[in-house]
Amino acid sequence: MCPATQSFDGVAVNVWRVKLGAFVGATVLTVTGNFWLALLAAAIVIAALGVLLQVTTLRPLIGRDPLTTILATFGISLVLQKYALWQWGPSVRRISEPVPGDFTLFHLQYPWYRIATAVLAGLILGGLWLFLKYGKYGIWIRATTQDRVMAQAMGIPVPLVYTAVFAIGSAMAAASGVLFGPFAGVTQTMGFDFTLRAFIVVVVGGMGNLGGSILASIFVSLLEAYAALVVSPAQAVIASFVVLVLTMLFRPTGLFVPTPK
């Protein structure tokens, strides 16, 4: 399966995980009034839902034609989007910032919550990298990604690994939806704004390369920021698509993947 196909598959799934996670978090926050409890509850609930969907729907599709998997995940995404619309309605739900106040830097005001979100996101990514690099089950995940048949022959429970990865991804997507909620509110279109950027980041960084994806996200963000100094912000997005096209033409494995010797 090519990187672009795998990336589209993962990004399509992440849209509903982010959205449902944000709605679950907003609901728990309304009941408990505790933002961090809502964050934890959303991650657990969506992780459990991800496990259920993976076992009942996606596990039978392992090893089949990539197009079948894409259609299945995209169909699940549409069903869950309509469920969210039916359950929570079309109105915007506001989530208050758990870290109030702001600070001044170069005569500009920045909320402390943005700093807290950046730090928390860095800790989550750092913990995930350590888990994949040094943890026993992280090694299982990397082995399954590189060669599923050989990993299974070595005794690694490949179906269980797929389920665990889906649960981890669901929990992280749900947490990101709750963390992003205070910035723009929780809406039915939540997740679509940065879906395309996530696709670009994964392809440019290299499929399965966590460090490359982090570097690609920084690179794409800086590229759009500097392009916005020359043209309008709407036109600056074109620079990201140019990088995406050039990467798929000349470096389909990703810009930040080491060249095999």
Image: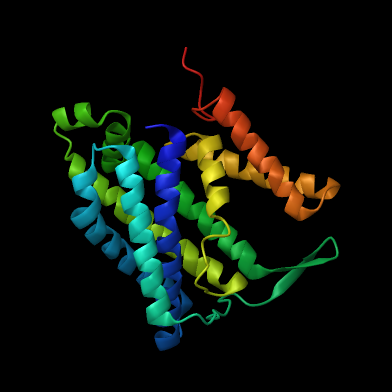
Q: Residue furthest top?
A: 261
| Coloring applied to the structure | rainbow
x and y, in percent, of residue 89 in the image: 45, 82
Whether residue 255 is visible, yes or no, is no
Whether residue 90 is visible, yes or no, is yes
x and y, in percent, of residue 138 in the image: 31, 41
* Front in this rendered view, residue 83 or 59: 83
User: Quick one: quadrant of the N terminus?
Assistant: top left
* Front in this rendered view, residue 160 or 199: 199
x and y, in percent, of residue 208 in the image: 42, 37
> Is 154 located above or below residue 134 in the figure?
above
x and y, in percent, of residue 122 in the image: 53, 52
Residue at the image position 54 percent from the left and 79 percent from the top = 95
Residue at the image position 33 percent from the left and 39 percent from the top = 66
Q: State which quadrant residue 183 falls in.
A: bottom right
* Front in this rendered view, residue 90 or 164: 90
Residue at the image position 70 percent from the left and 44 percent from the top = 238
Decide if residue 48 is on the left or right side of residue 175: left
> Is 173 located above or below residue 213 in the figure?
below
Decide if residue 119 is on the left or right side of residue 21: right
Residue at the image position 30 percent from the left and 55 percent from the top = 167
Decide if residue 75 is on the left or right side of residue 4: left
**Badge count:** 0
* Front in this rendered view, residue 4 or 118: 4
